[in-house]
Amino acid sequence: QVQLVESGGGLAQVGGSLTLSCVASGVDFTSASQMDWYRQAPGNQRSFVARIARNLGTYYAPSVKGRFTVSADDAKSTLYLQMNSLKPEDTAVYLCKIDVKGNTYWGQGTQVTVSS
């Protein structure tokens, strides 16, 4: 059974930092062709935040570029999102998604709240 478990969310102040983690189990993480972070704020649709496309590079939404950094550790089957210079509009549930051999898997999400 494939599981993606996010952690690291919480309450941060404007200008602060948080690091999110997404641990994958039950799947060959090294075979993931694409690993993403999305977020969903109340009343809004889920939106793309950041991506690692294996062997191609990293990609970011314009709203987070220069502030967020996505990375992965294959040995730990873990996807990370380092978030700096947080803004109130970054408040959302953050979810990880991985694509492995044609299958897409989502985590349940972790809440990030940025307080001014």
Image: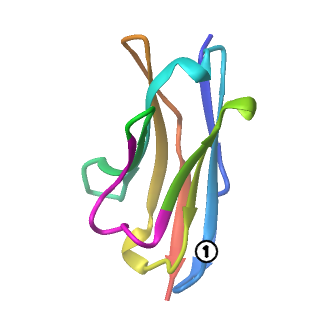
Where 4 sits versus 41, above or below?
Answer: above
Q: How is the image coloured?
A: rainbow
Q: Amino acid at mark 1?
A: Ser
Q: Residues within 10 Å of mark 1 (few under 14, many from 20)?
A: some
| Residue 78 image point, x, y percent | 66, 37
Q: Position of residue 45 (x, y in %)?
A: 25, 49
Of residues 52 and 109, the one drawn nearer to the viewer in this rendering:
52
Q: Provide residue 75's location: percent of width, then percent of height.
A: 74, 31
Q: Which residue is mark 1?
A: 17
Mark 1 residue element: loop
Rendered-image quadrant of the N terminus:
top right
Q: Is residue 9 among what the camera can see?
A: no
Q: Decide if residue 13 is on the left or right side of residue 75.
A: left
The image quadrant of residue 18 is bottom right
Q: Is residue 51 magenta?
A: no
Q: Is residue 78 left or right of residue 111?
A: right
Q: Residue 112 at x, y = what percent? A: 54, 63
Please report the bounds of the magenta region as a residue range.
57-68
Q: Who is closer to the viewer here, 52 or 102?
A: 52
- Which residue corresponds to the image point at 51% horizontal and 60% vertical from the top-left? 69
Give the farthest residue toward the front. Answer: 55
Residue 83, by quadrant, is bottom right
Where 3 falls versus 70 (above or below)? Answer: above
Nearer the observer, 41 or 59: 59
Residue 64 is inside the magenta segment: yes
Q: Examine the rendered structure and indicate whether residue 109 appears above or below residue 99.
A: below
Query: Which residue is drawn at the image coordinates 27% and 57% (left, top)?
Result: 43
Q: Which residue ends up furthest to the right in the rendered image?
A: 76
